[in-house]
Image: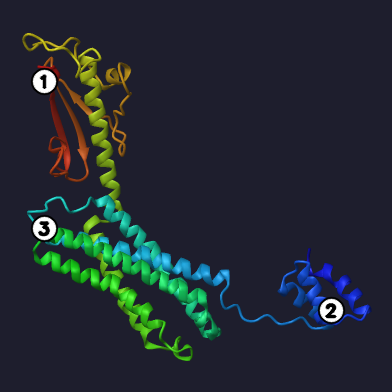
Amino acid sequence: MSQSSLAPFIAHARSTGMDHQTIRMLLLSAGWKERDISEALASESLEMAVPLPPDTGSARDAFFHLLSFTALTSAVVSLIFLFFEFLNRLLPDPAFPDESGDISSVRWELAVLIVSYPLYLWMSRLLLKEYATHHEKLASGVRRWLTYLILFVTACTLVGDLVALIFSLLQGEVTARFFLKVFTLSVLAGLPFRYYLYALRIAPDRYTTHHLHARYLYASVAIVLVTVIGAFVVTGSPLQGRAEQFDEQRLSDLRAIQSEIITIAWDGQPYGRPPAPTPLTTLPKPLPSTLQDVVANAQYQRPNIVDPETGVPYEYTRPSDHEFQLCAMFSLPRDLQYDVFWNHPVGQHCYEFDALEQQVK
C-alpha cells in the first residue's frame, strides 16, 4: 500500500480530533513503517514536500566504489604477473627453467590491464567529483567499508604472493631475481594500500585538493606505461600474434594430415597392430597419391589441406613407397624446448616421415 492510501485515513482521524502522535501510534501498531508515516503526515499538512538529504550512502555510491575497487584489483594482479614474467625472462635461473609463461598468458594479462586500469581511473575521477560537490559523502559508511575491503583484498594479494616468493626461496631461488620480485611486490601492492589507508585520514575539506591524489596518479600511470611497453616488447604486435596463429594452424593441419596418411597406410590401425615376428618391409596399403586422396579416404577426420592464410595447398611428396614429406610456408620461426620435431625456420620447411616406423615392435 502506497503513502497516498494513508491520506484518507489521516484526514478522517484528524476530523475526529486525533493529534499526530495518536495517529502515528495507530499506524505503527498496524505495521506501517516510521518513514512512510512521517512522509504521509508531512504531505497531509504541508504544501511543500520535505527535502531529501544528499545521497551519502546509496546503491549508486556502492556501485561506483565496487567497480573502482574491482578494476584496481584486476590491474594490480595483472601488473604483478607481468613484472614477474619480465624478471623471469630478463634474469633466467637455470634451476627454474620452466618459470616463464607462454606468450598467450602475457597477452591475456596485458588485455586485463588495458581494460581495467583506464576503467579504474575513470571511476576514481567520478568519485573525486562527487566528493568535491558533496563533502559529506567522505564520511559515508559505504565508502569506509568498501575502502577497508580493498585494503583487505590488497593485503591478501600481498600476503599470497609473498608466500609464493618465500616458497620459491625455500626451493632454492636465492638470486637477485628473487629480491627484485620482493621489491616489485612491495611497490605494486603497497602503493594502493598506502594510498587508500592515508586517504581515510585526510580532512573532508582538504580531500579533493590534497597532493596525495596527483602523486598517486603520476606514479601509477608511469608504472602502467612501463608495463604495457614491456609487454608489447615480449609479445610483439597484434600482427605478429596473427602470424603466430596462422603458423599454429599450419602445424595443426600438418599433424592431422600426417595422422590420416599413416592411418590409411596401416589400414585404420596405425598404433594398435599386434607385434610381428619380424618388422614389416611393406605397408599394408599404399600411401595416398595426393592430398585429395587423403581427404577422400580419411578414417577419423578430413584434414584441411590448404594454407589458412594464402589458400595454397600444402606440398605432399613420396620419396619412396613408405616415406613421405609434408611442406608448408611459415611466417615466423618456432624453436621451443618441447615437441622439438615440429620446430621450423621462417619460410618453406618440410617434415619427413617414415610410415613403417609406426608399426608396433
The answer to whether the residue labelled 3 contacts the one labelled 1, judged by CB atoms less than 8 Å apart, is: no
Instruction: Please tell me which of labels 3 and 1 falls first in the chain.
Output: 3
Q: Nearer the viewer, mark 3 or mark 2?
A: 2
Measured as percent of width and height from the top left, residue 170 is found at: 12, 59
Q: What is the total number of numbered labels drawn onto the structure image?
A: 3
Q: Nearer the viewer, mark 2 or mark 1?
A: 2
Residue at (25% x, 63% y) in the render: 161
Instruction: Please tell me which of labels 3 and 2 falls first in the chain.
Output: 2
Q: Amino acid at mark 2?
A: Glu
The answer to whether the residue labelled 2 contacts the one labelled 1, judged by CB atoms less than 8 Å apart, is: no
Query: Which residue is identified by label 2?
Result: 44
Colour scheme in the image? rainbow
Quadrant where the N terminus is found in the figure: bottom right
Q: Nearer the viewer, residue 142 or 225?
A: 142
Q: Amino acid at mark 1?
A: Glu
Query: Which residue is identified by label 1?
Result: 357
Q: Is residue 82 left or right of residue 207?
A: left
- Classify mark 2: residues with Cα within 10 Å, few (<14), some (14-19) or many (20+): some
Measured as percent of width and height from the top left, residue 296 is found at: 32, 17
Q: Amino acid at mark 3?
A: Pro
Residue at (15% x, 32% y) in the render: 350
Q: Nearer the viewer, residue 340 or 201?
A: 201
